[in-house]
Image (cartoon, rainbow, N blue to C red):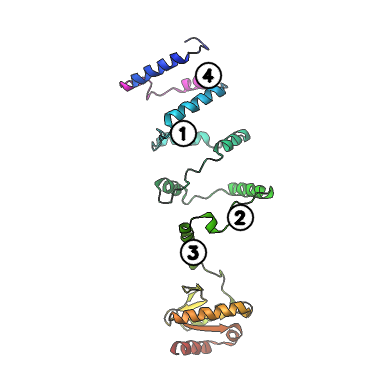
């Protein structure tokens, strides 16, 4: 072939049709599966080094690919790479960093393009496969710091979340809102609040231990005004509330306590509310008498 020669469009089409026909008739490339020597690879690499593809050529390639694959899946989709190839690619890319110019190009390319997992649920095979790969993996501290700095920079520059000030109903469908609220409700039911017990709660717990009374701390009580009680004695179906001076002196809290007590009694629970001043004077025997008086009432 003559160097720097250019084929006419007519000749290109002829060649293309000829090769297509050959492949349809069962022709296989004699180089298919043949391993290229390191020397040959180096020669090819040096020959292509510094060569730039013209804008016109890039546009042609994009147009050809679009025509070929428009509405069709990629021929490589679902075709797994051999382990050897994956390791080789991984080794080659290890430590490689994108230049700022490349990052900007990638950013422009992906702008407005929907995420690959948009609209997919966790039950989707692709999502499940990706999740299983990440399971147990932790991001390096360096990456966490970079992410944090990036977000701080965005916020300082005046960025605000598009979700800010919006309710769940404004963002999701009614069905999705119900699902989210149910998940939150279940999550809160299993979450221990508070993380630490108060001194008066610890005193009542110690009495229960000394008297061999089994108890559950912060059990979730499923009533209309659901919450986690301070102590629940399952053998006696008794709920004990340790009401501290400060929090249980507000009128709205007193009203809410009264409503909850009523709802729990209606459900068949026995309720014993102990104010902080009473707990401070309590001893083991007095506590035992109070419990059994409440149980027998």
Residue extent of the magenta highlight: 24-46
Which residue matches tag 4?
A: 47
Comparing labels 4 and 3, the label whose residue is closer to the camera:
3
Which residue matches tag 1?
A: 88
91 vs 279, left or right, is: left
Q: Nearer the viewer, residue 165 or 201?
A: 165
Position of residue 79 relative to residue 149, above or below, is above
**Does label 2 or label 3 sit earlier along the sequence?**
2
Whole-Å distance between the Cαs marked 4 and 3?
61 Å
**Does label 4 or label 1 sit earlier along the sequence?**
4
Which residue matches tag 2?
A: 164
Position of residue 3 relative to residue 69, above or below, is above
Secondary structure beneath disc 3? helix
Q: Is residue 53 visible?
A: no
Whole-Å distance between the Cαs marked 3 and 1?
44 Å
Whole-Å distance between the Cαs marked 2 and 3?
23 Å
């Amino acid at each position: 072939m003559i160097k720097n020669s250019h084929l006419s469009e007519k000749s290109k089409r002829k060649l293309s049709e000829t090769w297509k026909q050959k492949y349809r008739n069962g022709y296989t490339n004699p180089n298919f599966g043949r391993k290229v020597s390191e020397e040959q690879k180096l020669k090819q690499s040096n020959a292509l080094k510094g060569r730039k593809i013209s804008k016109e050529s890039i546009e042609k390639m994009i147009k050809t690919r679009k025509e070929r694959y428009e509405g069709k899946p990629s021929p490589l989709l679902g075709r797994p790479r051999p382990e050897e190839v994956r390791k080789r690619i991984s080794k080659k890319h290890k430590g490689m960093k994108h230049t700022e110019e490349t990052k900007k190009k990638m950013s422009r390319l992906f702008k407005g393009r929907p995420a690959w997992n948009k609209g997919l649920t966790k039950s989707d095979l692709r999502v499940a496969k990706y999740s299983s790969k990440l399971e147990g993996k932790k991001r390096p501290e360096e990456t966490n710091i970079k992410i944090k700095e990036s977000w701080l920079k965005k916020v300082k520059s005046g960025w605000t979340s598009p979700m800010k000030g919006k309710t769940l109903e404004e963002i999701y469908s009614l069905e999705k809102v119900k699902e989210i609220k149910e998940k939150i409700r279940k999550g809160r039911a299993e979450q221990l609040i508070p993380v630490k017990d108060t001194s008066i709660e610890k005193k009542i717990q110690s009495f229960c231990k000394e008297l061999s009374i089994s108890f559950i701390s912060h059990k979730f009580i499923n009533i209309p005004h659901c919450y986690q009680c301070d102590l629940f004695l399952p053998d006696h179906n008794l709920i004990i509330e340790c009401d501290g001076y400060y929090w249980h002196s507000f009128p709205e809290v007193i009203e809410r306590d009264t409503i909850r007590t009523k709802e729990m009694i209606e459900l068949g629970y026995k309720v014993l509310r102990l104010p902080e001043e009473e707990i401070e004077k309590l001893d083991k025997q007095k506590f035992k008498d109070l419990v059994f008086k409440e149980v027998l009432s």
